[in-house]
Image: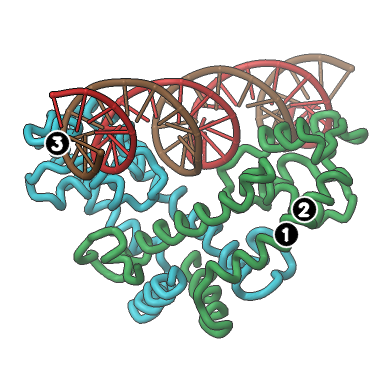
Chain colours: A green, B cyan, C red, D brown
DNA sequence: TACATTTGTATGTATATACATTAAATTCAT
DNA sequence: ATGAATTTAATGTATATACATACAAATGTA
């Protein structure tokens, strides 16, 4: 595969900026497709996995839906519905917040933590395999992406 | 904003590879959210825009659904349904292929070309604004992304 | 030619994104 | 203290992704 021009059969781009946007969209698809096959056997979507990781990061401290939303990779996703899906699988608990009855306290369950532990190892090693870069290059990529977003 | 650690409130990552994957997913969301607001007034999705661009690249030569699919940024998207949506808006024509009746010849219409012309200018300048990098950095980012995918 | 296999497209279903709207609880202002 | 404004979460709807399956047309083979 290699170059984006070959991958999507587009000869040229307006400028490196426009090429970078297309390249990012394409690379995203490459990564997500890979990740999906990993999550599939566990009946979890990448987005649900991400919510579980956010909750575990709380170390038992309950979190609200809006707080999850803020920390999600996709700011437009619907944390409320994702939490509902996770609850149906007993991976999270959802309780009314005692101090503010609008809010909902969400905590990851033991079952959720167990699943995360198994999955995380697989995800981490799959990510390393997917990213065909040296450590230095990966670091540089992170710098460029951080700068890109301003 | 800046660093991915601050953006999603995650203190550390397993390694630069895993950080890069998360960074890419997050940056993708940043770009797509921006693009969506551009396409919205024209009642077009980024994916539909992409299909129109692929068709225009054919310079009038009819294209099949599977050929579009191969060249899309997201290989898992459903070109058949996207074409149907575009056809309902008279942006593409769809005709039975004379040499192989399984295939469908798809061509962009005048209306589609006109819309593309207007939109493309906006997209190109929006992309340049979104990507807060120097030309050199953008080139380097493209190299890293190409290499990342192996 | 007859039949199995492959190919191209469409469709079915579940999940997620995008964005608007609703409804309840809380906060703010008068 | 009362009503307006804001906040939090849930819901509604359209579009897209992900993947399985169906079906017709074409191809390969006995």
Q: Chain of mark 2?
A: A
Instruction: Indicate whether C21 appears above or below B64.
Output: above
| Secondary element type, mark 1 | helix
* SS state under label 3: strand
Callout 3: few (<14), some (14-19), or many (20+) C-alpha neighbours within 10 Å? some
Question: Which residue has dot 1 on it?
Answer: A120
Q: Nearer the viewer, residue B34 or B28?
A: B28
Chain under callout 1: A
Quadrant where the C terminus of chain B sits is: bottom left
Q: Which mark is residue A116?
A: 2
Choose between B35 and A45: the one closer to the eye.
A45
Number of residues whose C-alpha sits closer than 10 Å to that of mark 1, classed few (under 14), some (14–19) or many (20 or more): few
In the rendering, at what x and y percent does residue A124 appear?
67, 65
- The residue lying furthest to the right in this view is A98
Disc 3: host chain = B
Residue B85 visible from this viewpoint: yes
Residue located beneath label 3 in the image: B105
Marks 2 and 1: in contact by CB < 8 Å? yes
Query: Residue B65 appears at what percent x and percent y?
Result: 24, 39
Residue drawn where x is 35% and y is 44% of the image: B46
Which x, y percent locates residue C30? Answer: 74, 26
């Amino acid at each position: 595969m290699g170059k984006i021009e070959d991958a999507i059969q587009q000869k040229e781009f307006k400028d490196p900026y426009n090429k970078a946007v297309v390249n990012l969209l394409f690379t995203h698809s490459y990564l997500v497709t890979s990740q999906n096959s990993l999550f599939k056997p566990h009946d979890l979507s990448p987005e649900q996995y991400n919510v579980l990781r956010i909750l575990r990061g709380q170390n038992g401290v309950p979190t609200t839906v809006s707080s999850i939303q803020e920390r999600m990779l996709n700011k437009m996703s619907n944390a409320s519905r994702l939490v509902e899906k996770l609850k149906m699988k007993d991976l999270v608990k959802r309780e009314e917040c005692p101090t503010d009855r609008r809010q909902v306290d969400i905590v990851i369950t033991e079952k959720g933590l167990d699943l995360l532990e198994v999955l995380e190892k697989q995800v981490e090693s799959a990510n390393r395999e997917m990213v065909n870069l040296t450590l230095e290059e990966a670091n540089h990529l992170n710098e460029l992406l951080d700068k890109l977003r301003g």
